[in-house]
Image (cartoon, rainbow, N blue to C red):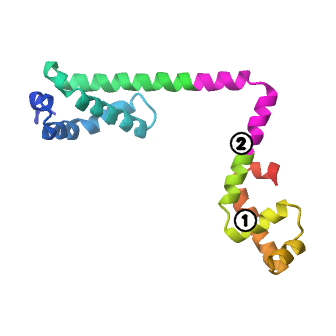
Amino acid sequence: MADNPIDIQALARGDEKAFQALFVEYYPALVSFGCRYVVSKETAEDIVQDVFVRIWETRESLAKIEDLSAYLYQMVRFRCFNHLRDAKTHSDALRDYAENMPTEDMNNYIKEESFRLAMKALEDLPPASRQVFSHMLDGLSAQEIAKKLNIAVETVKKHKQIARRILKEKLGRLYLFLF
C-alpha cells in the first residue's frame, strides 16, 4: 500500500479518481480484515462498502487525518463491532419474545406460518397440478376432479403425484403435518 500513496487532499476536495484509487487500494484488505470479526464475507463486504460511502460523504474532514490507513481499519473494526452488537441484541430480543410468548399465541403463529408456507408452495406448483391438488383439498375424489376438469382419472392421479412430490420437496417434514 505504501507504493501508491493516496492523495488525501485531492480526496478531501472530492476528486473521484482519488476516491477510486483509495477504493481499489484498500477494499480487498479491509474486507479480509472485516472477516476476522464477522462470520460472513458478504457481511464484511457490506460493512466495508458502508465505510467507503461514509468516507465519501465526509471527505472534507479527511484533510485532518494523519494516518488514513489506520483510520480506515479503525472504521471497519468499529462497524464490525456495531454489527455484532446489533445482531446479538436482535437475537436476544427474538429469544426473549419467543420465551415469553403465551402458548396460545405461539401455536397461532406456528399455524399461520405453516399455512403461509403451504400456500406459497401451492402457488409454485405447475398450473394443472395446482388445480387438481386444490380440488383434492376441497374433498373431491379423483373421479369427481376428472369429471369437473374434463380429463382422465389417470391424468388426475398423475397431477396429484406431481403435486405431492413437489410439495414434499418444498415443505419437508411440514408436508407430513399438512397433507
The image quadrant that residue 134 belongs to is bottom right
The image quadrant that residue 138 belongs to is bottom right
**Of 150 and 110, the residue lying toward us:** 150
Q: Is the residue 85 above or below the residue 155 in the image? A: above
Mark 2: secondary structure? helix
Mark 1: secondary structure? helix
Q: CA distance from mark 1 to mark 2?
A: 20 Å
**Of 54 and 172, the residue lying toward us:** 54
102 drawn magenta: yes
Left of 22 or right of it: where is 143?
right
The image quadrant that residue 83 belongs to is top left
Left of 147 or right of it: where is 168?
left
> Badge 1: few (under 14), some or many (20 or more) residues near its Cα, within 10 Å?
some
Give the label on residue 130, or none.
1
State the quadrant of the C terminus.
bottom right
Q: Residue at x 41, y 27 (%)?
A: 37
Q: Residue at x 67, y 53 (%)?
A: 120
Q: Visible in this render: residue 169?
A: no
Q: Which residues are magenta?
A: 91-114
Q: Which residue is mark 2?
A: 113
